[in-house]
């Protein structure tokens, strides 16, 4: 017989009764279990809550799995690079400027030499114990002590210095040295994240982060050859000679200088690219000095006044106002008034770029120079000589 709409069979009613009976029993068991747990083990229900010694309930983060790295963390790069960054302490004996004056000695006696101490950082770049640092960190020092992150100490000796880039190479005699991995600074881009590692103010090794703010900074009056990486990672006194590394922990530069009105970081720091540091390292270790190209000219920034004086029509390049008689440039045919536009295929826009480009040339090996002479372009082959050693005074 067909059922009327809305009519429920007795078997269906019994089935629904059994379902509700099971449901109510399950809810009763769960409520009872919750009551028992809440009474006997309330900590099980306080996810992340802990009771402090003062009886205050605190929320705590769930423990991270072993080896997990927090999002945005630079801990991997810091752990990789930091052990190879060392602290450098220097001392030198300094006498009073009037200590040899008889009247000064009569009234004040002979004070004798006074110890002057210095502080900086360095980077271990070889298992053989070679350390890169700044020349101004160790210049004139009588004693140099290097302290590693594992608290080992060693006396360092100077292998060589290059004042024109403000770099120095030290060497220590220790076993099982941590070594930093050299990166490729030519691939850096503005906006890349970087870390500065060093020993600012002697407080101990410190890691700061920032970005690459600019590349190829020059004409700062710091070094003869300037091609700085600019960064806003905090660099302070004591960081000189320390490491500027990328997010992989690879060395990209040697921290050297800051722009500051207070003596502390103002977000403008400068580092020597690792490409320059590597060239200096190889030259000093191999030859005892850095060999650079030299052509014997007096360069000047191109200005409308100089261009008009020498009768040259050029809008960019470096104008030559003097040529050393008998020098490589004179022998190749360069003249005062020539504007150098390219050196070995690299464009030249200012004096700093010209110095850097010529210094990179191999002495005795001809290189093409593109010039603007009068109304036309001229290409000459110039065989550079060896740049005479120079010492630059630092500010």
Image: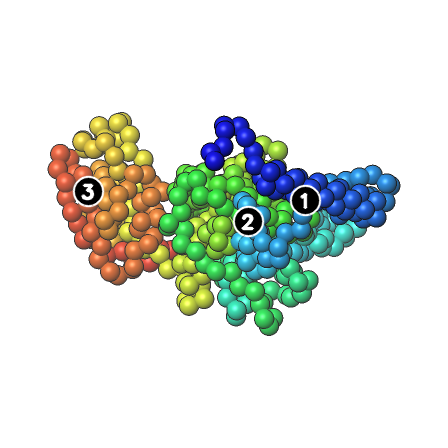
Q: Mark 2 points at which residue?
A: 74
- Assess disc 1: are there few (<14), some (14-19) or many (≥20) residues with their C-alpha within 10 Å of its C-alpha: few
**Which residue is drawn at the image coordinates 20% and 51% (left, top)?**
368
Q: In this view, does 300 lie above or below 152?
A: above
Q: In this view, does 70 lie to the left or right of 355?
A: right
**Which residue is drawn at the image coordinates 69% and 42% (left, top)?**
21
Q: In this view, does 38 lie to the left or right of 6?
A: right
| Residue 123 percent across, percent down from the top left | 54, 58
Q: Is residue 256 above or below residue 88?
A: above
* Front in this rendered view, residue 78 or 201: 78
Q: Mark 1 points at which residue?
A: 22
**Which residue is drawn at the image coordinates 24% and 60% (left, top)?**
365
Q: Which mark is residue 371?
A: 3
Instruction: Decide which of tag 1 and tag 2 comes sooner along the chain.
Output: 1
Cβ atoms under marks 1 and 2 closer than 8 Å: no
> Residue farthest to the right?
54
């Amino acid at each position: 017989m067909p059922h009327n709409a809305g009519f429920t069979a007795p078997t269906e009613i019994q089935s629904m009764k059994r379902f509700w009976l099971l449901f109510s029993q399950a809810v009763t068991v769960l409520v009872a279990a919750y009551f028992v747990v809440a009474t006997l083990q309330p900590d099980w229900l306080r996810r992340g809550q802990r009771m402090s010694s003062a009886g205050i309930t605190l929320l705590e983060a769930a423990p991270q799995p072993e080896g997990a790295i927090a999002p945005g963390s630079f801990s991997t790069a810091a752990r990789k690079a930091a052990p190879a960054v060392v602290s450098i302490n220097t001392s030198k004996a300094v006498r009073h400027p009037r200590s040899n004056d008889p009247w000064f000695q009569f009234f004040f006696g002979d004070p004798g030499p006074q110890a002057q101490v210095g502080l900086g950082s360095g980077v271990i770049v070889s298992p053989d114990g070679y350390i890169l640092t700044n020349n101004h960190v160790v210049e004139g020092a009588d004693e140099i002590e290097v302290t590693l992150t594992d608290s080992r100490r060693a006396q360092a000796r100077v292998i060589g210095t290059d004042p024109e880039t403000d770099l120095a190479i030290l060497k220590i005699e220790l076993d099982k040295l941590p070594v930093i991995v050299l990166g490729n600074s030519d691939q850096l881009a503005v906006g890349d994240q970087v870390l500065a590692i060093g020993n600012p103010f002697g407080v101990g090794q410190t890691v700061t982060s920032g970005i690459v703010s600019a590349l190829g900074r020059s004409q700062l009056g710091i070094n003869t050859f300037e091609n700085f990486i600019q960064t806003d990672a905090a660099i302070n006194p004591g960081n000189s000679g320390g490491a500027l590394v990328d997010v992989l922990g690879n060395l990209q530069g040697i921290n050297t200088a800051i722009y500051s009105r207070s003596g502390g970081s103002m977000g403008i720091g400068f580092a020597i690219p690792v490409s320059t540091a590597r060239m200096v390292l190889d030259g000093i270790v191999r030859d005892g000095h850095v060999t650079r190209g030299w052509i014997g000219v007096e360069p000047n920034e191109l200005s409308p006044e100089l261009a008009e004086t020498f009768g040259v029509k050029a809008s960019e390049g470096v104008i030559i106002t003097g040529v050393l008689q008998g020098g490589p440039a004179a022998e190749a045919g360069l003249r005062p008034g020539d504007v150098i536009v390219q050196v070995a295929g690299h464009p030249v826009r200012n004096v700093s770029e010209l110095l850097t480009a010529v210094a990179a040339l191999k002495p005795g090996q001809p290189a093409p120079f593109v010039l603007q002479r009068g109304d036309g372009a001229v290409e000459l082959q110039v065989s550079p000589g060896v740049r005479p050693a120079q010492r630059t005074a630092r500010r």
